[in-house]
Image (cartoon, rainbow, N blue to C red):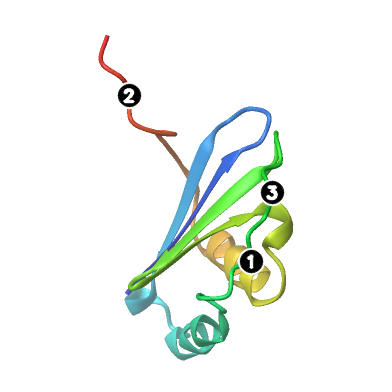
Amino acid sequence: MDVSVSRSGGIGGLRLVWEVDLDREPDRESWEVLLHDIPWDEVPPAPPEPDRFIYRIRCEPHEATLAERQVTGPWRELVDRVRARSEPRRAASGPRRAR
């Protein structure tokens, strides 16, 4: 099982992705407890905030998109934990248009 956190936006507009394969983690059970505590279906809507980060968090079958200020509680714990276990990689910020 993979957990993926991507962060986009901000002034530079870069998109960074961190990924963790839970099957390779020695403390998989603690990850599973944390993932169970995530309120996947209860992400409140947030107004757009220019130049702020947006987080997309995925762990099949779940996915959530949160504004920077919504990343609190178990969301913050998960984001921080994934970032601590993985080196970020740059990702394309969106599909390129044909010229």
Disc 3 residue type? Answer: Pro
Quadrant of the snapshot with the C terminus: top left
Q: Earlier in the sequence, mark 3 or mark 2?
A: 3
- The N terminus appears in which quarter of the rendering? bottom left
Residue type for callout 2: Arg
Which class describes the residues within 10 Å of circle 3: few (<14), some (14-19), or many (20+)?
Answer: few
Disc 1: which residue = 44
- Residue 4 location in percent, x, y? 43, 60
What is the C-alpha distance between the residues marked 3 and 2?
26 Å
The spot of residue 41 in percent (x, y) is 51, 76
Please tell me which residue is depicted at 32% across the width and 24% down the height of the picture: 96
Answer few, some or many: residues within 10 Å of disc 1's Cα (few below 14, many 20 plus, some between 14 and 19). Answer: few
Q: Nearer the viewer, mark 1 or mark 2?
A: 1
Q: Residue at x 51, y 43 (%)?
A: 16
Q: CA distance from mark 1 to mark 2?
A: 30 Å
Q: Which residue is mark 2?
A: 96
Judge by depth and name the residue closer to the eye, 98 or 10: 98
The residue that label 3 is drawn on is 47
**Is residue 33 left or right of 94 when viewed as pictured?**
right
In the rendered image, the vertical position of residue 57 relative to residue 96, given as above or below: below
Tags 1 and 2 touching, CB below 8 Å: no
Q: Secondary structure at mark 2?
A: loop
Looking at the image, tell me whether mark 1 or mark 2 is earlier in sequence order: 1
- The spot of residue 66 in percent (x, y) is 59, 57
